[in-house]
Amino acid sequence: MITDVNLRSEFQSRLLNWFETHKRDLPFRKKKPNPYHIFVVEVMLQQTQIKTVIPYYHRWFKTFSTVESLAQAPIDRVLKLWEGLGYYTRARNLHKAAKMIVDEFGGKIPNTVNELMRLPGIGRYTAGAISSIGFGKPAPIVDGNVARVFARLFNVKKDILNSDTQKYFYELAAQLVPEKEPGTFNQALMELGSLVCISEIPKCEICPVRNLCLAYKNKTQLDLPVRKNKTEIKKIEMVVGIIEKNSRILIRKRPPYGIWGGLWEIPGTVRTKGQTPEEALMQEFQEALGLKIKIQKTLPQIVHHLTHRNLMIYPYVCLISEKQKRGQASSVARMPVPVLRSMPKNTRWASQCNLKRFSFPVPHQNILKRCLTQQVVTFR
Ligand code: SF4
Protein backbone atom coordinates (compact mmCIF):
# COMPACT_ATOMS: atom_id res chain seq x y z
CA MET A 1 0.00 0.00 0.00
CA ILE A 2 1.13 3.53 -0.70
CA THR A 3 0.94 5.29 2.63
CA ASP A 4 3.49 8.00 1.89
CA VAL A 5 1.66 10.98 0.37
CA ASN A 6 4.91 12.49 -0.91
CA LEU A 7 5.83 9.32 -2.77
CA ARG A 8 2.37 9.18 -4.30
CA SER A 9 2.54 12.72 -5.56
CA GLU A 10 6.12 12.23 -6.82
CA PHE A 11 4.94 9.18 -8.78
CA GLN A 12 1.99 11.09 -10.23
CA SER A 13 4.01 14.10 -11.32
CA ARG A 14 6.90 12.05 -12.77
CA LEU A 15 4.48 9.94 -14.76
CA LEU A 16 2.37 12.87 -16.00
CA ASN A 17 5.45 14.88 -17.04
CA TRP A 18 6.82 11.92 -18.96
CA PHE A 19 3.44 11.35 -20.64
CA GLU A 20 3.21 14.97 -21.74
CA THR A 21 6.37 14.65 -23.83
CA HIS A 22 6.33 10.97 -24.83
CA LYS A 23 2.69 10.05 -25.46
CA ARG A 24 1.72 8.72 -28.84
CA ASP A 25 -0.40 10.99 -30.98
CA LEU A 26 -3.65 9.03 -31.21
CA PRO A 27 -6.89 10.29 -32.79
CA PHE A 28 -8.95 9.58 -29.67
CA ARG A 29 -6.58 11.48 -27.38
CA LYS A 30 -8.34 14.83 -27.39
CA LYS A 31 -8.11 17.76 -24.99
CA LYS A 32 -11.87 17.52 -24.52
CA PRO A 33 -12.70 13.84 -24.99
CA ASN A 34 -16.13 12.94 -26.33
CA PRO A 35 -17.58 10.25 -23.97
CA TYR A 36 -19.33 8.47 -26.87
CA HIS A 37 -16.02 8.27 -28.77
CA ILE A 38 -14.22 6.96 -25.67
CA PHE A 39 -16.99 4.44 -25.10
CA VAL A 40 -16.69 3.05 -28.66
CA VAL A 41 -12.91 3.08 -28.83
CA GLU A 42 -12.51 1.38 -25.44
CA VAL A 43 -14.74 -1.44 -26.65
CA MET A 44 -12.75 -1.65 -29.90
CA LEU A 45 -9.49 -1.80 -27.92
CA GLN A 46 -10.61 -4.81 -25.87
CA GLN A 47 -8.21 -7.53 -27.06
CA THR A 48 -7.19 -5.51 -30.13
CA GLN A 49 -4.08 -3.43 -30.81
CA ILE A 50 -4.27 0.34 -31.24
CA LYS A 51 -2.90 0.36 -34.81
CA THR A 52 -5.61 -2.09 -35.89
CA VAL A 53 -8.34 -0.01 -34.26
CA ILE A 54 -7.44 3.41 -35.76
CA PRO A 55 -8.98 2.98 -39.26
CA TYR A 56 -12.11 1.47 -37.68
CA TYR A 57 -12.31 4.41 -35.29
CA HIS A 58 -12.35 6.89 -38.19
CA ARG A 59 -14.86 4.91 -40.24
CA TRP A 60 -17.17 4.32 -37.30
CA PHE A 61 -17.91 7.95 -36.53
CA LYS A 62 -18.50 8.80 -40.19
CA THR A 63 -21.34 6.25 -40.12
CA PHE A 64 -22.55 6.42 -36.51
CA SER A 65 -21.82 9.96 -35.41
CA THR A 66 -24.04 9.73 -32.31
CA VAL A 67 -25.13 7.07 -29.88
CA GLU A 68 -28.68 7.49 -31.24
CA SER A 69 -27.60 6.70 -34.80
CA LEU A 70 -25.86 3.56 -33.53
CA ALA A 71 -28.93 2.51 -31.52
CA GLN A 72 -31.20 2.92 -34.57
CA ALA A 73 -28.93 1.05 -37.02
CA PRO A 74 -29.71 -2.54 -38.04
CA ILE A 75 -27.29 -5.01 -36.47
CA ASP A 76 -26.08 -6.20 -39.91
CA ARG A 77 -24.84 -2.67 -40.66
CA VAL A 78 -23.01 -2.57 -37.32
CA LEU A 79 -21.40 -5.96 -37.98
CA LYS A 80 -20.40 -4.89 -41.49
CA LEU A 81 -18.53 -1.89 -40.06
CA TRP A 82 -16.89 -4.16 -37.48
CA GLU A 83 -15.85 -6.69 -40.13
CA GLY A 84 -12.21 -7.72 -39.66
CA LEU A 85 -11.91 -6.38 -36.10
CA GLY A 86 -12.78 -9.79 -34.62
CA TYR A 87 -14.55 -10.75 -31.38
CA TYR A 88 -17.92 -9.80 -32.86
CA THR A 89 -19.74 -10.15 -29.54
CA ARG A 90 -18.25 -6.74 -28.80
CA ALA A 91 -20.10 -5.20 -31.76
CA ARG A 92 -23.38 -6.82 -30.77
CA ASN A 93 -22.94 -5.67 -27.15
CA LEU A 94 -22.04 -2.16 -28.30
CA HIS A 95 -25.25 -2.05 -30.30
CA LYS A 96 -27.32 -3.34 -27.36
CA ALA A 97 -25.58 -0.88 -25.02
CA ALA A 98 -26.38 2.03 -27.38
CA LYS A 99 -30.07 1.05 -27.32
CA MET A 100 -29.98 0.86 -23.52
CA ILE A 101 -28.28 4.29 -23.29
CA VAL A 102 -31.04 5.79 -25.46
CA ASP A 103 -33.89 3.98 -23.65
CA GLU A 104 -32.71 4.16 -20.05
CA PHE A 105 -30.24 7.05 -19.87
CA GLY A 106 -31.91 9.55 -22.20
CA GLY A 107 -29.18 9.16 -24.84
CA LYS A 108 -26.41 10.25 -22.46
CA ILE A 109 -23.50 7.89 -21.73
CA PRO A 110 -23.57 7.20 -17.97
CA ASN A 111 -20.53 8.58 -16.14
CA THR A 112 -20.11 6.34 -13.10
CA VAL A 113 -18.40 2.97 -13.01
CA ASN A 114 -21.46 1.27 -11.48
CA GLU A 115 -23.87 2.58 -14.12
CA LEU A 116 -21.47 1.84 -16.94
CA MET A 117 -21.05 -1.73 -15.72
CA ARG A 118 -24.79 -2.27 -16.22
CA LEU A 119 -24.24 -1.94 -19.97
CA PRO A 120 -23.62 -5.17 -21.91
CA GLY A 121 -19.95 -5.86 -22.62
CA ILE A 122 -18.68 -3.25 -20.17
CA GLY A 123 -16.50 -4.68 -17.41
CA ARG A 124 -14.67 -2.96 -14.61
CA TYR A 125 -11.68 -1.88 -16.70
CA THR A 126 -13.73 -0.42 -19.59
CA ALA A 127 -16.12 1.31 -17.18
CA GLY A 128 -13.16 2.89 -15.35
CA ALA A 129 -11.60 4.00 -18.64
CA ILE A 130 -14.83 5.63 -19.89
CA SER A 131 -15.52 7.27 -16.53
CA SER A 132 -11.99 8.65 -16.07
CA ILE A 133 -11.02 9.51 -19.66
CA GLY A 134 -14.48 10.49 -20.93
CA PHE A 135 -15.80 12.26 -17.82
CA GLY A 136 -12.76 13.11 -15.67
CA LYS A 137 -13.89 10.96 -12.73
CA PRO A 138 -11.11 9.52 -10.52
CA ALA A 139 -11.91 5.89 -11.36
CA PRO A 140 -9.07 3.36 -11.07
CA ILE A 141 -8.25 1.08 -13.99
CA VAL A 142 -6.10 -2.04 -14.27
CA ASP A 143 -5.53 -3.56 -17.70
CA GLY A 144 -2.74 -5.96 -18.68
CA ASN A 145 -0.22 -3.11 -19.03
CA VAL A 146 -1.07 -1.60 -15.66
CA ALA A 147 -0.94 -5.01 -13.95
CA ARG A 148 2.57 -5.57 -15.33
CA VAL A 149 3.74 -2.11 -14.23
CA PHE A 150 2.29 -2.61 -10.74
CA ALA A 151 3.77 -6.09 -10.38
CA ARG A 152 7.22 -4.58 -11.01
CA LEU A 153 6.75 -1.26 -9.31
CA PHE A 154 5.58 -2.91 -6.06
CA ASN A 155 7.59 -6.13 -6.53
CA VAL A 156 4.47 -8.33 -6.43
CA LYS A 157 5.50 -11.97 -6.82
CA LYS A 158 2.00 -13.39 -6.96
CA ASP A 159 0.13 -14.55 -10.06
CA ILE A 160 -1.17 -11.37 -11.71
CA LEU A 161 -4.22 -13.19 -13.09
CA ASN A 162 -5.31 -14.30 -9.62
CA SER A 163 -8.45 -12.47 -8.44
CA ASP A 164 -6.86 -11.46 -5.09
CA THR A 165 -3.89 -9.94 -6.93
CA GLN A 166 -6.26 -8.11 -9.29
CA LYS A 167 -8.16 -6.79 -6.27
CA TYR A 168 -4.90 -5.61 -4.71
CA PHE A 169 -3.91 -3.87 -7.96
CA TYR A 170 -7.26 -2.09 -8.04
CA GLU A 171 -6.65 -0.89 -4.48
CA LEU A 172 -3.24 0.45 -5.53
CA ALA A 173 -4.75 2.09 -8.64
CA ALA A 174 -7.47 3.73 -6.51
CA GLN A 175 -4.81 5.19 -4.21
CA LEU A 176 -2.69 6.47 -7.07
CA VAL A 177 -5.29 7.99 -9.39
CA PRO A 178 -5.44 11.77 -8.75
CA GLU A 179 -8.60 13.88 -8.51
CA LYS A 180 -7.12 16.24 -11.08
CA GLU A 181 -6.74 14.81 -14.58
CA PRO A 182 -7.48 11.18 -13.64
CA GLY A 183 -8.07 10.24 -17.30
CA THR A 184 -4.66 11.58 -18.33
CA PHE A 185 -3.04 9.77 -15.41
CA ASN A 186 -4.69 6.46 -16.33
CA GLN A 187 -3.63 6.82 -19.95
CA ALA A 188 -0.09 7.64 -18.79
CA LEU A 189 0.04 4.49 -16.68
CA MET A 190 -1.07 2.33 -19.61
CA GLU A 191 1.33 4.15 -21.95
CA LEU A 192 4.23 3.43 -19.57
CA GLY A 193 3.34 -0.26 -19.82
CA SER A 194 3.08 -0.07 -23.63
CA LEU A 195 6.27 1.88 -24.32
CA VAL A 196 8.69 1.45 -21.38
CA CYS A 197 7.72 -1.24 -18.88
CA ILE A 198 7.16 -3.67 -21.75
CA SER A 199 6.57 -7.37 -21.25
CA GLU A 200 9.80 -8.71 -22.79
CA ILE A 201 12.65 -6.64 -21.32
CA PRO A 202 11.57 -3.44 -19.55
CA LYS A 203 13.41 -0.28 -20.62
CA CYS A 204 14.37 0.70 -17.07
CA GLU A 205 17.14 3.00 -18.31
CA ILE A 206 14.55 5.46 -19.69
CA CYS A 207 11.82 4.87 -17.10
CA PRO A 208 10.51 8.05 -15.42
CA VAL A 209 9.60 6.23 -12.17
CA ARG A 210 12.74 4.11 -11.90
CA ASN A 211 13.75 5.64 -8.54
CA LEU A 212 10.40 4.47 -7.07
CA CYS A 213 10.42 0.98 -8.56
CA LEU A 214 10.95 -1.91 -6.14
CA ALA A 215 11.67 -4.44 -8.90
CA TYR A 216 14.41 -2.17 -10.24
CA LYS A 217 15.82 -1.77 -6.74
CA ASN A 218 15.73 -5.54 -6.11
CA LYS A 219 16.77 -6.47 -9.68
CA THR A 220 13.68 -8.65 -10.08
CA GLN A 221 12.17 -6.87 -13.08
CA LEU A 222 12.92 -9.75 -15.47
CA ASP A 223 11.20 -12.25 -13.15
CA LEU A 224 7.99 -10.22 -13.02
CA PRO A 225 5.10 -10.35 -13.57
CA VAL A 226 4.33 -13.90 -12.45
CA ARG A 227 1.70 -15.66 -14.57
CA LYS A 228 0.41 -19.09 -13.69
CA ASN A 229 -2.28 -21.28 -15.22
CA LYS A 230 -1.99 -19.92 -18.72
CA THR A 231 -5.07 -20.95 -20.65
CA GLU A 232 -4.32 -23.83 -22.98
CA ILE A 233 -4.57 -22.96 -26.66
CA LYS A 234 -6.89 -25.40 -28.41
CA LYS A 235 -6.42 -26.46 -32.01
CA ILE A 236 -9.65 -26.61 -33.99
CA GLU A 237 -9.92 -27.92 -37.53
CA MET A 238 -12.65 -26.49 -39.75
CA VAL A 239 -13.64 -27.34 -43.27
CA VAL A 240 -15.51 -25.10 -45.74
CA GLY A 241 -16.93 -25.69 -49.21
CA ILE A 242 -17.17 -23.11 -51.99
CA ILE A 243 -19.96 -23.86 -54.44
CA GLU A 244 -20.45 -21.65 -57.48
CA LYS A 245 -23.66 -21.82 -59.47
CA ASN A 246 -25.25 -19.43 -61.98
CA SER A 247 -22.47 -16.85 -61.29
CA ARG A 248 -23.21 -16.93 -57.58
CA ILE A 249 -21.69 -18.66 -54.60
CA LEU A 250 -23.48 -20.18 -51.67
CA ILE A 251 -23.09 -18.39 -48.33
CA ARG A 252 -24.72 -18.94 -44.97
CA LYS A 253 -25.44 -16.76 -41.93
CA ARG A 254 -24.01 -18.04 -38.66
CA PRO A 255 -26.19 -18.20 -35.53
CA PRO A 256 -26.21 -14.96 -33.50
CA TYR A 257 -24.10 -16.44 -30.68
CA GLY A 258 -20.68 -18.08 -30.38
CA ILE A 259 -17.66 -17.58 -32.58
CA TRP A 260 -18.36 -15.11 -35.44
CA GLY A 261 -21.99 -14.93 -34.31
CA GLY A 262 -24.27 -13.19 -36.83
CA LEU A 263 -21.62 -13.04 -39.59
CA TRP A 264 -21.86 -14.74 -42.97
CA GLU A 265 -19.63 -17.64 -43.88
CA ILE A 266 -18.64 -20.05 -46.57
CA PRO A 267 -20.69 -23.04 -45.40
CA GLY A 268 -18.72 -25.66 -43.50
CA THR A 269 -18.24 -27.29 -40.15
CA VAL A 270 -15.76 -28.37 -37.49
CA ARG A 271 -14.02 -31.64 -38.28
CA THR A 272 -14.57 -34.16 -35.53
CA LYS A 273 -12.29 -37.02 -34.53
CA GLY A 274 -12.31 -39.95 -36.91
CA GLN A 275 -13.53 -37.94 -39.93
CA THR A 276 -11.47 -36.77 -42.86
CA PRO A 277 -12.05 -33.09 -43.76
CA GLU A 278 -13.83 -34.22 -46.95
CA GLU A 279 -16.17 -36.53 -45.03
CA ALA A 280 -16.97 -33.79 -42.52
CA LEU A 281 -17.78 -31.36 -45.33
CA MET A 282 -19.97 -33.75 -47.32
CA GLN A 283 -21.87 -34.71 -44.16
CA GLU A 284 -22.47 -31.05 -43.25
CA PHE A 285 -23.76 -30.17 -46.74
CA GLN A 286 -26.02 -33.20 -46.77
CA GLU A 287 -27.44 -32.77 -43.26
CA ALA A 288 -27.57 -28.99 -42.82
CA LEU A 289 -28.21 -27.88 -46.40
CA GLY A 290 -29.73 -30.94 -48.05
CA LEU A 291 -27.05 -30.89 -50.75
CA LYS A 292 -25.06 -33.81 -52.09
CA ILE A 293 -21.67 -32.51 -53.10
CA LYS A 294 -18.51 -33.71 -54.81
CA ILE A 295 -15.08 -32.30 -54.00
CA GLN A 296 -13.68 -30.67 -57.12
CA LYS A 297 -10.52 -29.02 -55.84
CA THR A 298 -8.52 -28.74 -52.61
CA LEU A 299 -7.31 -25.23 -51.76
CA PRO A 300 -4.37 -24.32 -49.46
CA GLN A 301 -5.18 -24.44 -45.75
CA ILE A 302 -5.64 -21.24 -43.77
CA VAL A 303 -4.36 -20.81 -40.21
CA HIS A 304 -6.10 -18.26 -38.01
CA HIS A 305 -5.18 -17.45 -34.41
CA LEU A 306 -7.75 -16.46 -31.79
CA THR A 307 -6.97 -15.79 -28.13
CA HIS A 308 -7.47 -19.33 -26.91
CA ARG A 309 -7.87 -21.19 -30.19
CA ASN A 310 -5.81 -21.86 -33.26
CA LEU A 311 -8.03 -22.55 -36.24
CA MET A 312 -6.90 -24.63 -39.17
CA ILE A 313 -9.35 -24.19 -42.04
CA TYR A 314 -9.45 -26.59 -45.01
CA PRO A 315 -11.19 -24.94 -48.00
CA TYR A 316 -12.53 -26.96 -50.92
CA VAL A 317 -14.20 -26.06 -54.19
CA CYS A 318 -17.22 -28.33 -54.57
CA LEU A 319 -19.82 -29.26 -57.13
CA ILE A 320 -23.41 -30.19 -56.47
CA SER A 321 -23.81 -33.84 -57.33
CA GLU A 322 -25.72 -34.56 -60.55
CA LYS A 323 -28.10 -36.70 -58.54
CA GLN A 324 -29.28 -33.67 -56.60
CA LYS A 325 -32.76 -32.69 -57.67
CA ARG A 326 -33.44 -29.11 -58.66
CA GLY A 327 -36.29 -27.18 -57.16
CA GLN A 328 -37.88 -23.79 -56.50
CA ALA A 329 -36.34 -20.39 -55.94
CA SER A 330 -35.47 -19.38 -52.40
CA SER A 331 -34.42 -16.16 -50.71
CA VAL A 332 -31.57 -14.59 -52.62
CA ALA A 333 -29.57 -11.41 -52.16
CA ARG A 334 -31.92 -8.99 -53.98
CA MET A 335 -32.20 -10.85 -57.31
CA PRO A 336 -34.03 -14.15 -57.47
CA VAL A 337 -32.06 -16.99 -59.09
CA PRO A 338 -32.90 -20.65 -59.26
CA VAL A 339 -31.60 -22.57 -56.28
CA LEU A 340 -32.07 -26.00 -54.86
CA ARG A 341 -35.07 -27.23 -52.96
CA SER A 342 -35.28 -26.97 -49.17
CA MET A 343 -32.44 -24.54 -48.77
CA PRO A 344 -32.46 -23.14 -45.22
CA LYS A 345 -33.52 -19.51 -44.75
CA ASN A 346 -30.07 -18.53 -43.49
CA THR A 347 -28.47 -19.26 -46.89
CA ARG A 348 -28.05 -17.05 -49.96
CA TRP A 349 -26.64 -17.38 -53.43
CA ALA A 350 -24.55 -14.21 -53.66
CA SER A 351 -23.05 -12.62 -56.76
CA GLN A 352 -19.54 -11.13 -56.64
CA CYS A 353 -21.06 -7.67 -56.37
CA ASN A 354 -23.48 -8.71 -53.62
CA LEU A 355 -20.75 -10.38 -51.56
CA LYS A 356 -19.55 -6.94 -50.47
CA ARG A 357 -22.84 -6.38 -48.64
CA PHE A 358 -22.24 -9.29 -46.26
CA SER A 359 -19.86 -9.37 -43.28
CA PHE A 360 -17.49 -12.34 -43.21
CA PRO A 361 -14.92 -13.42 -40.60
CA VAL A 362 -11.35 -12.57 -41.63
CA PRO A 363 -10.25 -16.11 -42.63
CA HIS A 364 -13.36 -16.49 -44.82
CA GLN A 365 -12.65 -13.09 -46.42
CA ASN A 366 -9.13 -14.33 -47.14
CA ILE A 367 -10.37 -17.55 -48.70
CA LEU A 368 -12.80 -15.63 -50.91
CA LYS A 369 -10.11 -13.13 -51.93
CA ARG A 370 -7.74 -15.95 -52.79
CA CYS A 371 -10.45 -17.70 -54.83
CA LEU A 372 -11.09 -14.53 -56.80
CA THR A 373 -7.46 -13.61 -57.45
CA GLN A 374 -6.58 -17.16 -58.48
CA GLN A 375 -9.82 -17.38 -60.49
CA VAL A 376 -10.88 -20.50 -58.64
CA VAL A 377 -14.27 -18.80 -58.54
CA THR A 378 -15.06 -16.78 -61.64
CA PHE A 379 -18.64 -15.55 -61.13
CA ARG A 380 -19.17 -16.11 -64.81
FE1 SF4 B 1 9.19 -1.12 -15.20
FE2 SF4 B 1 11.83 -0.84 -15.07
FE3 SF4 B 1 10.25 1.27 -14.80
FE4 SF4 B 1 10.37 -0.56 -12.89
S1 SF4 B 1 12.02 0.76 -13.59
S2 SF4 B 1 8.51 0.39 -13.72
S3 SF4 B 1 10.63 -2.40 -14.11
S4 SF4 B 1 10.50 0.02 -16.64
Image: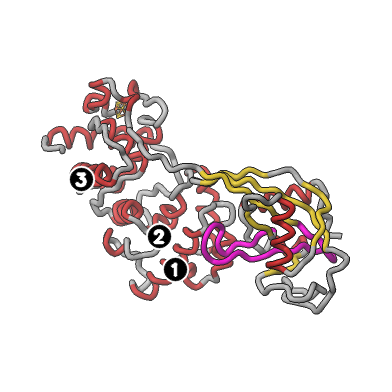
Quadrant containing ligand 1: top left
- Image-based side of 346 in relation to 324, left or right: left
Q: Quick one: quadrant of the N terminus?
A: top left
Q: Is residue 231 above or below residue 263?
A: above
As helix, strand or loop, the secondary structure at mark 2 comes to loop
Distance in Å between CA atoms under marks 2 and 3: 23 Å
The secondary structure type at the circle numbered 3 is: helix
Return the residue at label 1.
96
Residue 28 on image: x %, y %: 43, 49
Q: Is residue 278 left or right of residue 323?
A: left
Query: Where residue 103 sits: x, y (%)?
Result: 38, 75
Q: Amino acid at mark 2?
A: Gly
- Residue range highlighted in magenta: 242-266
Q: Residue 351: percent from the left, percent from the top?
A: 77, 64
Labels 1 & 2 near each other (Cβ < 8 A):
yes
Q: Which residue is mark 2?
A: 121
- Residue sitting at 33 percent across and 26 percent down? 223
**Gap between marks 1 and 3, in whole Å?**
31 Å
| Mark 1–mark 2 distance (CA, rounded to whole Å) | 9 Å
